[in-house]
Amino acid sequence: MVKDRTLSSKVLDGIVHFVMIIVVIVTLFPVLNIIAVSFSSPENISNGSVVLFPKGFNLSAYRTILFEDVHIPKSFVNSIFITLVGTIANVMITTITAYSLSKKYLVMRGYFITFVVIPMFFGGGIIPLFLVVKSLGMVNSYSSLIIPSLMSPWWLIIMISFFRTFPVEIEEAAKIDGCSDFGALIRIVLPLSTAAVATISLFYAVAHWNSFFSAMMYLNNYNMYPLQLILRDIVLQNSLAEQLAASGNVALANEVQSSLTPQSVQYATLVISIIPMLIVYPFIQKYFVKGIMIGSLKG
């Protein structure tokens, strides 16, 4: 490939690189500031001298939320459980449904696709949804956070578009060898659909990990709260001390109030909440662009 070395091309490359540098700075600055504040001493945080690097290196916030307050570690485990179970259920239901709806010979296929697409534009509202969940006995259980959002119409359509591009000849060969439709899906189609499956898995996982509104509606047991809902309470109350006192841990609340700033606790909790996604994303990133493009452009 011949590289364009004209002046206009060089100017365009310079503009693109400059814009990307600005985007990186704007993106990284708040993250680095959050990390710096979480590791800084209360005095430096209070006087506003912490910007990009920690001042007066201090692990008190992390020690408090990880070892002294039992609710945040427990909520972290709760979030991991909800994310893992929810993502697995989402991917299974979405994949099986999309594979079925991608077949033109499916009876009443158009009706089912219409039935799936309607919720993308119209919803019953929060109160009817809560009443349905309550009538099914799912209130105050993790099933209320997983089953109502079991399948996203958007990702279902993406997967249908992807499966439509899959070579029919490969499936027919598998069926000649004795595979059923489900066997062809498990043994042939899914192993060749890693990019698409990894992409929707990432989005489902991020949605479950960041969700707090459903937990706020359906969960009454404080010990079942996910991490994001605990973080929301800390941010709204502006103090871990108040949150601890509200949960009955008065002694630790008094200790925290005297040794930590609300901002350091908030930021330390934020850092912990983003770590799992930072760990998972590099392993899925290589499939990300490929999976999105296959599903959206070839559908």
Image (spheres, grey):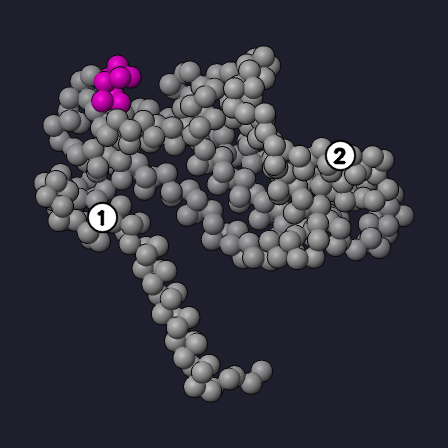
Q: Secondary structure at mark 1?
A: helix
Q: Is residue 245 magenta?
A: yes
Q: Residue furthest front?
A: 122
Q: Which mark is residue 68?
A: none
Which amino acid type is shown beneath numbered disc 2? Phe
Residue drawn at x 62%, y 42% as measured from the top left:
154
Q: Quadrant of residue 29?
A: bottom left
Which amino acid type is shown beneath numbered disc 1? Ala
Q: How far is disc 2 from disc 1 in space, using C-alphas?
A: 51 Å
Residue drawn at x 54%, y 25% as measured from the top left:
125
Pointer 2 residue: 112
Q: Quadrant of the N terminus?
A: bottom right
The total of numbered circles placed on residues is 2
Q: Quadrant of residue 134?
A: top right
Dominant secondary structure, magenta: helix
Q: Say left or right for 47 vs 286.
A: left
Q: Please provide the residue range marked out in magenta.
A: 242-249
Pointer 1 residue: 36
Residue drawn at x 55%, y 32% as measured from the top left:
86
Sequence-wise first label, 2 or 1: 1
- Label 1 crowding class (10 Å Cα cut-off): few <14, some 14-19, many 20+? many
Location of residue 136 in the rendering, given as x and y in whole percent from the top left corner: 60, 14
Q: Is residue 179 magenta?
A: no
Q: Residue furthest right?
A: 176
Task: State the residue in front, 93 or 237.
Answer: 237
Task: State the residue in front, 277 or 131.
Answer: 131
Evaluate whether residue 143 shows in this view: no
Location of residue 112 in the rendering, given as x and y in whole percent from the top left corner: 75, 34
Residue drawn at x 58%, y 45% as measured from the top left:
200
Evaluate whether residue 119 shows in this view: yes
Mark 2–mark 1 contact, CB under 8 Å?
no
